[in-house]
């Protein structure tokens, strides 16, 4: 019998992202120096990683790759809860015209993105945002991203406090490096050899920040417009008997990103951990974030989200770890029920008597397109009537706090630009969402934003042919499996696998509290009409009462998916 002792397995090496964060903990890289260099239009690979912490992605126009890469930049704002005053909206609109591609892209996390910004415009654009008392800090990168909150302007005590709390948490979780101000406001390259910079340690994030991105949302039942359970950290507002905010149910461990062919990656809904009172909010947020900081996987970025910590260590472990960090016990979670996630369109009255107007934005892209001059129309209303602007998680827009006597004037002004306030879009189109994907996103495997509108036309034609044209189906599409438009929480989700090819997922629900499942691993564009036509025909024939498509899919199709999966090993 051998007495040799097997060597211990070698420790996994940290990812390259961890190495560069360790080397330059200020996140400054050589960004300012490259920004000032007129001889290049691109940043180094390492600096592209640092740029994300500043809210910037370097991209290229993939439609032009055959003739050589044309580098440009996507810039994302940090807009807590998606709330802007009219002056802030005007700044974004101006910058999109002057430095971007004359469109504003609404994100699925209640922010704006600029696309098509070239390097010469990057510095001026960033400085103008900061001069206007806004910023892009931590809109991307291994830090907390934009904090989401309910979009509808609820004017009661709970609604006001939840929105204020979202902004408070966003501010409390910002990184403190002076690199952002130095680069984008002062235009100065930090001295990376200065001991103060070389040895910088963020008081919250530490020297190497988080293993991956971190996402937070606030919600108020029964509306789940933020898809609360898909976030790393969620706060569900619980009302007290007197109509004030009693506290929050805490949810942790949601996330949707995955990779094709990698079964170690998967979408996951958050667990409900407990309840706490509002005075403990920031302590809880910091505590959850530091658990991710200390226990997240720094050796594999595909496995580095907080959802995997929850999945592998469990809720009991997490609750004990969090309670030890914050120094108090959580109460048991309160009963709560979500019923819907849809946006409101058209005119509605706020609780204070003023009005808000919900406007549909096709695939989240605010632009002037033929007779529909939505970008110009919105700007005209913002300039003349000074409404509050609220961005929704479904990539639509709300104009709020409008006096009732201005309703007709706002409606008339929008009509001058071809923007309707009633019958804005079909029921299917209003419930759809897409990520940008081609031609700007380097991760895109298939079309999404540019393709979904025409696919919706085809789906509507199929449903109309079945006398089901008035049925709502929540449809979401992404060009890759990262899931930015949250396709795994849709009744019908499309995930790009390659040009003209999509994975199809079925079975999410109206409240966005149930994930869907893979129905077809790959469906080509030419096959989609026949595949969905047969599926919708079954739904019509087999539904119980007014059963929604997602609920029917979970009841009728999921057992077939499970049976096929069980039979697959035997067949092999």
Image (spheres, rainbow, N blue to C red):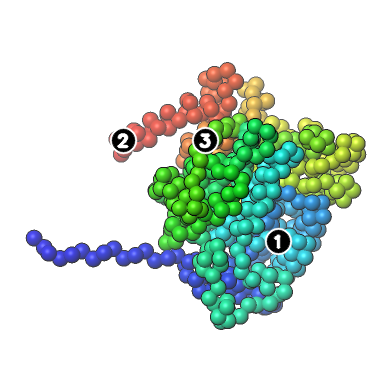
In whole angstroms, how far apart are the C-alphas of marks 3 and 1?
34 Å
| Badge 2 or badge 1: first in the primary sequence | 1
Q: Position of residue 45 (x, y in %)?
A: 55, 69
- Give 161 or 268, whichever is nearer the viewer: 161
Q: What SS does tag 2 mark?
A: helix
- Whether the residues at callouts 2 and 3 have beta carbons within 8 Å, the answer is no
| Badge 3 or badge 1: first in the primary sequence | 1
- Graded by Cα atoms within 10 Å as few (under 14), some (14 to 19) or many (20 or more), the crowding at tag 3 reads many
In whole angstroms, how far apart are the C-alphas of marks 2 and 1?
56 Å
Which quadrant is home to the N terminus?
Answer: bottom left
Residue 323 seen in render? yes
Q: Quadrant of residue 294?
A: bottom left
- Give 419 or 341, whichever is nearer the viewer: 341
Find disc 3 in the rendering and name its residue.
514
Q: Quadrant of residue 122?
A: bottom right
Q: Position of residue 40 (x, y in %)?
A: 65, 75
Q: What SS does tag 1 mark?
A: loop
Q: Which mark is residue 571?
A: 2
| Badge 2 or badge 3: first in the primary sequence | 3
Residue 243 vertical position relative to residue 74 in the rendered view, above or below: above
Q: Which mark is residue 135?
A: 1
Q: Residue at x 62, y 60 (%)?
A: 174
In whole angstroms, how far apart are the C-alphas of marks 2 and 3?
30 Å
């Amino acid at each position: 019998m051998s007495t040799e002792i097997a060597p211990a397995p070698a420790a996994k090496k940290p990812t390259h992202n961890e190495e560069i964060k360790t080397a330059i903990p200020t996140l400054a890289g050589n960004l300012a120096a490259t920004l000032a260099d007129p001889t290049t239009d691109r940043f180094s690979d390492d600096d592209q990683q640092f740029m994300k912490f500043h809210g910037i992605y370097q991209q290229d126009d993939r439609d032009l790759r055959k003739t050589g890469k044309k580098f440009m930049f996507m810039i994302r704002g940090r807009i807590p809860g998606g709330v802007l005053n009219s002056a802030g909206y005007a700044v974004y609109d101006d910058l999109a015209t002057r430095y971007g591609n004359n469109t504003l892209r609404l994100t699925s996390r209640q922010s704006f993105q600029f696309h098509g910004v070239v390097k010469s415009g990057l510095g001026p654009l960033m400085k103008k945002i900061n001069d206007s008392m806004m910023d892009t800090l931590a809109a991307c990168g291994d830090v907390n991203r934009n904090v989401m909150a309910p979009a509808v302007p609820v004017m009661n005590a709970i609604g006001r406090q939840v929105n204020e709390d979202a902004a408070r948490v966003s501010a409390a979780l910002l990184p403190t490096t002076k690199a952002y101000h130095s680069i984008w406001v002062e235009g100065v390259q930090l001295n990376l050899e200065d001991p103060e910079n070389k040895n910088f340690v963020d008081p919250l994030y530490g020297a190497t920040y988080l293993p991956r991105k971190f996402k937070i949302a606030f919600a108020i039942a029964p509306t789940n417009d933020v898809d609360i359970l898909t976030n790393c950290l969620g706060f569900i507002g619980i009302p007290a008997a007197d109509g004030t905010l009693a506290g929050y149910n805490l949810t942790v461990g949601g996330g949707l990103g995955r990779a094709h062919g990698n079964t170690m990656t998967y979408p996951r809904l958050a667990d409900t951990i407990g309840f706490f009172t509002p005075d403990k909010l920031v302590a809880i947020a910091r505590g959850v974030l530091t658990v991710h900081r200390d226990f997240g996987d720094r050796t594999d970025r595909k496995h580095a989200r907080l959802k995997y910590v929850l999945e592998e260590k469990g809720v009991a472990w997490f609750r004990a770890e969090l309670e030890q960090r914050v120094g108090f016990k959580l109460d048991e979670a309160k009963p709560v029920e979500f019923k819907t996630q849809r946006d409101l369109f058209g005119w509605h009255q706020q609780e204070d008597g003023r009005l808000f107007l919900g406007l549909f934005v096709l695939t989240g892209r605010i632009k002037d397109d033929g007779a529909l001059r939505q970008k110009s129309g919105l700007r005209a209303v913002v300039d003349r009537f000074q409404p509050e602007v609220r961005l929704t998680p479904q990539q639509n827009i709300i104009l709020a706090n409008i006096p009732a006597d201005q309703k007709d004037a706002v409606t008339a002004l929008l009509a001058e630009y071809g923007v309707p306030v009633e019958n804005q879009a079909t029921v299917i189109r209003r419930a759809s969402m897409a990520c940008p994907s081609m031609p700007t996103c380097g991760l895109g495997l298939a079309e999404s934003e540019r393709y979904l509108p025409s696919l919706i036309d085809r789906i509507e034609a199929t449903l109309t042919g079945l006398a089901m044209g008035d049925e709502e189906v929540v449809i979401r599409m992404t060009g890759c499996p990262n899931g930015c438009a949250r396709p795994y929480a849709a009744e019908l989700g499309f995930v790009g696998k390659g040009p003209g090819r999509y994975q199809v997922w079925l079975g999410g629900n109206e409240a966005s509290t149930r994930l869907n499942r893979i129905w077809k691993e790959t469906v080509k564009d030419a096959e989609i009409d026949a595949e969905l036509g047969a599926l919708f025909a079954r739904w019509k024939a087999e539904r119980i009462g007014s059963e929604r498509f997602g609920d029917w899919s979970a009841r009728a199709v999921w057992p077939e998916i499970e049976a096929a999966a069980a039979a697959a090993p035997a067949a092999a």
